[in-house]
Image (cartoon, grey):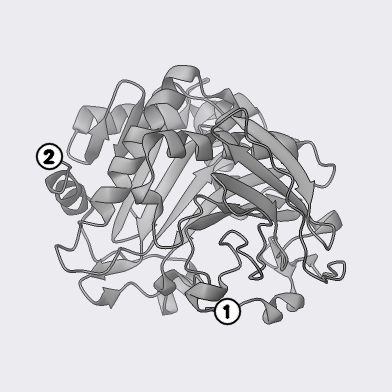
């Protein structure tokens, strides 16, 4: 992998990740952009104790542009985009309309491929490994920023999810706090550790799923994918490395080498869940990593107690129908799942690649 860092016309950082070590990146952003100004701030809810990002400048972000005006495609002639060069393998750049910025963190866009009409599932294993290396490198770099406490790599796929740019891409949020969902996990891990005299909750969950077997979607030498016992979403898969590590940085070479094949298989199965002729399955793919800030609030827990894992889920519950977060989910954070987790796992095994 070759990494080349440059600056866009408004001062934002852009980084090329190339498969070939001899690739040269010298293209300059020719757009007449003024320096980006954001209004992002983080406010704490005194009742719930969580943080809310206020980012009113995002109202002006690009919304469903035609394919020939896609800002994530390479620059071609006089059609200037966010990527100055005429081609690329993987590109990461600071979001022009970030939810978090400055002392409130940082937001980046990850373009998985220059091919506008493809999806992550269309990538080769070599390309997927390059994306993994980009996620890992950005996790490392962002974790050293003074304002950053947690790094979150994710992909939203599909208009049903709220995606406004059709080009295959994901995002990275660098939060100045530990997110509420991670805090819940850490509190559960701390309670379990104390109750069991040092046991690890993540390890126990994985062991129980492997022993039960009925919710296992696939298992390889270094990765295990399963539908969780109390799945929140109609089709939801959690992907764990067999060896517990706190973040992407700690994955060993064997797990890195095997990841592309495993992940591409999961994504391709998701597109087959609802049968032939159905539109691509909308999904969210979310990496959960241990925070890089202090864990003093979670007594007895350290970073190595956390287990890196990826959660992949769709809001489509059946053909032509979506799972909406209505009264119970949005008002009280109590999920109601229409699909039995065991049934979801069985379906995801049925649509395995031959």
**Which of 206/54 is in front?**
54
As drawn, 246 above or below 176: above
As drawn, 92 above or below 37: above
Q: Residue at x 20, y 72 (%)?
A: 319
Disc 1 vs disc 2: Cβ atoms closer than 8 Å? no
As drawn, 213 above or below 152: above
Residue 135 in view here: yes
**Which of 169/185 is in front?**
169
Q: Residue at x 48, y 24 (%)?
A: 244
Work out which quarter of the rendered image holds the N terminus and state it: top right
Label 2 sits on a secondary structure element that is loop
Residue at the disc numbered 2 = 354
**Residue 101, horizontal then vertical, whole percent:** 79, 59
Work out which quarter of the rendered image holds the C terminus and state it: top left
Q: Residue at x 68, y 37 (%)?
A: 24
Q: Is residue 290 left or right of residue 68?
A: right
Q: Is residue 194 left or right of residue 4?
A: left
As drawn, which residue projects farthest toward the front? 77
Crowd band around label 2 with a 10 angstrom C-alpha radius: few (<14), some (14–19), many (20+) = few
Residue at the disc numbered 1 = 63
Task: Check residue 178 in the rendering and tell me which mark sits there, or answer none.
Answer: none
Q: Residue at x 71, y 51 (%)?
A: 175
Q: Earlier in the sequence, mark 1 or mark 2?
A: 1
- How many marks overall? 2
**Residue 161, horizontal then vertical, whole percent:** 44, 69
Label 1 sits on a secondary structure element that is loop
């Amino acid at each position: 992998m070759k990494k080349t860092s440059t600056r866009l016309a408004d001062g934002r950082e852009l980084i090329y990740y190339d498969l070939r070590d001899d690739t040269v990146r010298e293209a300059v952003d020719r757009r007449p952009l003024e320096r980006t100004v954001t209004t992002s701030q983080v406010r704490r809810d005194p009742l719930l104790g969580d943080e809310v990002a206020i980012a009113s400048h995002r109202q002006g972000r690009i919304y469903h542009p035609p394919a020939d005006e896609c800002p994530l495609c390479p620059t071609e002639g006089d059609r200037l985009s966010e990527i100055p060069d005429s081609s690329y393998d993987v590109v990461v750049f600071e979001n022009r309309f970030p939810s978090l910025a400055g002392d409130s963190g940082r937001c980046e866009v990850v373009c998985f491929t220059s091919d506008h009409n493809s999806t992550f599932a269309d990538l080769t294993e070599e390309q997927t490994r390059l994306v993994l290396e980009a996620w890992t490198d950005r996790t490392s770099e962002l974790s050293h920023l003074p304002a950053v406490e947690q790094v979150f790599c994710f992909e939203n796929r599909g208009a049903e999810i709220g995606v406004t740019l059709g080009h295959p891409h994901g995002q990275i949020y660098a939060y100045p706090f530990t997110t509420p969902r991670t805090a819940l996990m850490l509190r559960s891990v701390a309670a379990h550790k104390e109750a069991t005299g040092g046991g690890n909750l993540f390890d126990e969950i994985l062991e129980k799923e492997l022993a039960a077997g009925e919710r296992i979607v696939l298992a390889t030498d270094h990765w295990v994918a399963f539908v969780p016992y109390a799945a929140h979403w109609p089709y939801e898969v959690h992907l764990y490395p067999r060896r517990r590590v706190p973040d992407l940085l700690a994955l060993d070479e064997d797990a890195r080498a095997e990841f592309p094949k495993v992940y591409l298989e999961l994504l391709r199965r998701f597109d087959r869940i609802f049968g032939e002729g159905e539109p691509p399955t909308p999904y969210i793919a979310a990496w959960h990593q241990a925070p890089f800030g202090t864990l003093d609030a979670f007594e007895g827990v350290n970073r190595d107690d956390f287990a890196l894992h990826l959660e992949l889920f769709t809001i489509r519950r059946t053909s032509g129908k979506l799972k909406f977060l209505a009264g119970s989910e949005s008002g009280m954070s109590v999920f109601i799942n229409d699909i039995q987790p065991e049934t979801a796992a069985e379906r995801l095994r049925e649509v395995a690649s031959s």
